[in-house]
Image: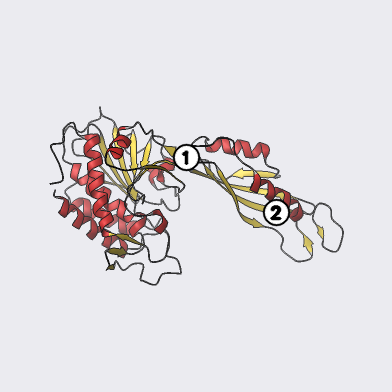
Amino acid sequence: MKKEKLILEAILLLKNLIKTPSFSSEEHLTALLIESWFQDSNITFNRTNNNIWAINKHFDETKPSLLLNSHHDTVKPTNGYTKDPFDPVINAGKLFGLGSNDAGGCLVSLLATFSFFYHHKNLKYNLVMVASAEEESSGENGLNSMLSIMPEIAVAIIGEPTLMQLAVAEKGLVVFDAKVIGTPGHAAHKNDDNAIYNSIEVLKWFQEYTFEKHSESLGDVKMTVTQIQAGKQHNAIPSEVALVVDVRVNDRYSNKEIAEILEKESPCSTIVPRSLRLNSSSISVEHDLIKAGLELGRKTYGSPTLSDQSVLSCPSLKLGPGDSTRSHTADEFIYLQEIEEGITLYIKLLEKTLLDTKDETLG
């Protein structure tokens, strides 16, 4: 299929996705749109909950599989929108709308790329395409639910806005619930074990604590107290202070190791992780995908934001059109030129990685 047709069809699909609300766990209508796209493209597909997925026509079980993945769910629009978040308006080369940048542009570009290679024989890797749900909420029925259903994945490209630069590592996330304990009492009486006062030193500890292992691509582990709650009435000293601690984990630690360190060293009475499954991820700069990207003039970096990479155990690359700084903002948009560049570079990257010869080009 010609490059121009791929781009036009991708933009049309993105417009339709923008028109259709698809908040996390409520993606059934955009799932139907993606089903229709596969049908119109004469590509055999499967549906698991709101995840739509397919494999290349000449799938070979003896070969490793490369996953192409992006999500079709969105966050809810912020109060700052001046435009209708569900109206895909084009102005000055920008396509506006909720989910246009995060991650609709990536999704339609990967779908176009998958369709380009779908009929190709003798690929070095099989291709598995997953348009996934519940990424924004890290839900139970997202990409993580597909791991036991789709073919085993050797390496993955996760479509998230990176300005088409190579995010070769991504920080993981652990959220902790912690408590600082004290002695409850009446505010009128002396109390040397006030839980709120006790929390001052605890908060200072979190502010000053540093984890030893530094990552070249992701920097240091970043730990931040993001919520604090205590007390129900003005004249009663509470028995405890509840803290929520957000920890962004580099690729030198597993989430389990972070939890063990904090359980041992933190001055909290208790500190409990909500989940340990959102681990950091990375891919070697010696991998063929990264070498191909560097040959195409792309640069590598480490990403501080979380994506569906966190549920994969294989090497994975985050790569996509759009800019991460536009994600979750009012009047979200993506440049049409970025979608064109995304499709072009995805295909060139996979031509270098999948094909034994370069006899099939964009034309």
In this figure, which residue is indicated by the disc labeled 1?
280
Residue 347 pos. (x, y %): 22, 44
337 up-or-down from 86: above or below: above
Label 2–label 1 contact, CB within 8 A: no
**Which of pointers 2 and 1 lies earlier in the amino acid sequence?**
2
Between 211 and 243, which is closer to the camera in this rendering? 211
Q: Residue 199 carries which label?
A: none
Amino acid at circle 2: Val
The mark closer to the camera, 2 or 1, is 1
Q: Residue at x 34, y 64 (%)?
A: 97
Is residue 346 in sight in this rendering? yes
Q: Which mark is residue 241?
A: 2
200 up-or-down from 215: above or below: below
Residue 11 pos. (x, y %): 24, 58
- Quick one: SS at disc 1? loop
Determine whether, in the image, residue 205 is placed left or right of residue 245: right
Amino acid at circle 1: Ser
Alpha-carbon span between mark 2 and mark 1: 30 Å
